[in-house]
Amino acid sequence: MPTIREVAKAAGVSPGAVSRILNHDITLNVSEPTRQKVLAVAQEMNYIKKSTGKQVKSTLTFGILQWYSIRQELEDPYYLSIRLGAEKYCSEHSINVVRAFRGDADYSALKGVNGLICIGKFAEDEIETFSRISPNFILVDMHTTRILHNCMTLDFLHATTDALDYLISLGHQKVGYLGGKEYISENTVYFEQRKSVFEAYCKEKGLLYEPYVLEASYSIESGYQMMSDLLQQNDLPTAIFTASDAIALGAIRALNEKGLHVPDDISIIGFDNINASAYTNPPLTTVNAPTELMGEYAANFIMTSLSLYRQYHIPMQMMLPCSLIKRGSCKDICNTKL
């Protein structure tokens, strides 16, 4: 069994930092990439944290099923943050955790769990498998048109509307959208509400947007490539709403390489509010997505719904609010000649 020192050596940090990260010490001043790296290394090495003080024997075991691989989690911390929130709650309440990742040969490790937290987007046949593993399960970050399963999502409707209202207030009438596609199955694309709200809003307000809508994946590389493609056009929008901070970071890189500056030449709004967004140049205006809290809420729901759900079998849909964080990447162009 690996030790904290071995995990620290592999991650390139001190044993003390590893200990505090694994214990979810919020007072530790450490960058998000470093925290993610330590957690990933600990998981890859199958490190098991030793208990200290009084031993509290847990009678509950929750399964956490992540549709992202460890590598994808490191590249896009959105789903990693949800998982860490769920694991933090379980740790604080002495709940055993069994982890699984989509694509595992089978889910035999999840057999007998008291509840299941499924993070990501899943097809109906997969959801049916989850219900057989444990009827007490919740889909996190997946919306269903009918309330057939417990699910938890973010309020993308008002989050997108708030971002666009802000751009309108700054005088922008030509607005672009850079987003990503997520696949429920090989040939089925998950419905992206932010894009749908964006298009409906622009149509209602009479904004020019259609030439500036691109979708690829939720990554820095994708944002860079989509922005590079937009730059091939002779006409650019004055502002861009991106569906993730990672996409925004890639877009800013592409603009800088072409000698264009944010926000003087183009304004950009991100989505997620990852730690790096506050340290871009200029700091990125973004939508704060409470992903870690969403993971905690999901674990809390699974624990508290054990008895009620067994009795009534009535699923619920829950939605968490988002908030716009205004920083320096958006410019008021009301009095600027375009």
Image (cartoon, rainbow, N blue to C red):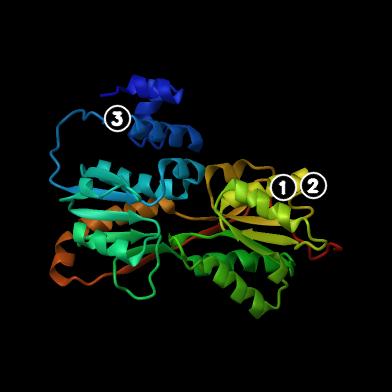
Q: Relative to 333, is 252 above or below?
A: above
Q: Toward the viewer: 56 or 77? A: 77
Q: Position of residue 108 (x, y in %)?
A: 21, 48
* Dot 1 crowding, Cα within 10 Å, few <14, some 14–19, many 20+: many
Q: Secondary structure at mark 2?
A: loop
Q: Position of residue 228 (x, y in %)?
A: 72, 52
Looking at the image, residue 291 sits to the left or right of residue 46; the answer is right
Amino acid beneath label 3: Tyr
Determine the image quadrant of residue 36: top left
Question: If the image is split into quadrants, where does the N terminus sit?
Answer: top left
Looking at the image, residue 65 sits to the left or right of residue 13; the answer is left
Q: Secondary structure at mark 1?
A: helix
Distance from disc 2 to disc 3, alpha carbons, whole Å, reads 46 Å
Q: Residue at x 38, y 32 (%)?
A: 21
Distance from disc 1 to disc 3, alpha carbons, whole Å, reads 40 Å
Q: Which numbered marker is on residue 254?
A: 1
Mark 1 / mark 3, whichever is N-terminal: 3
Residue on which disc 2 sits: 258
CB under 8 Å between callouts 2 and 1?
A: yes
Q: Residue at x 45, y 33 (%)?
A: 37
Question: If the image is split into quadrants, where does the C terminus sit?
Answer: bottom right
Residue on which disc 3 sits: 47
Q: Secondary structure at mark 3?
A: loop
Amino acid beneath label 1: Ala
Q: Toward the viewer: 287 or 130? A: 130
Determine the image quadrant of residue 53: top left
Q: Position of residue 187 (x, y in %)?
A: 46, 64
Q: Is residue 209 visible?
A: no
Amino acid beneath label 2: Lys
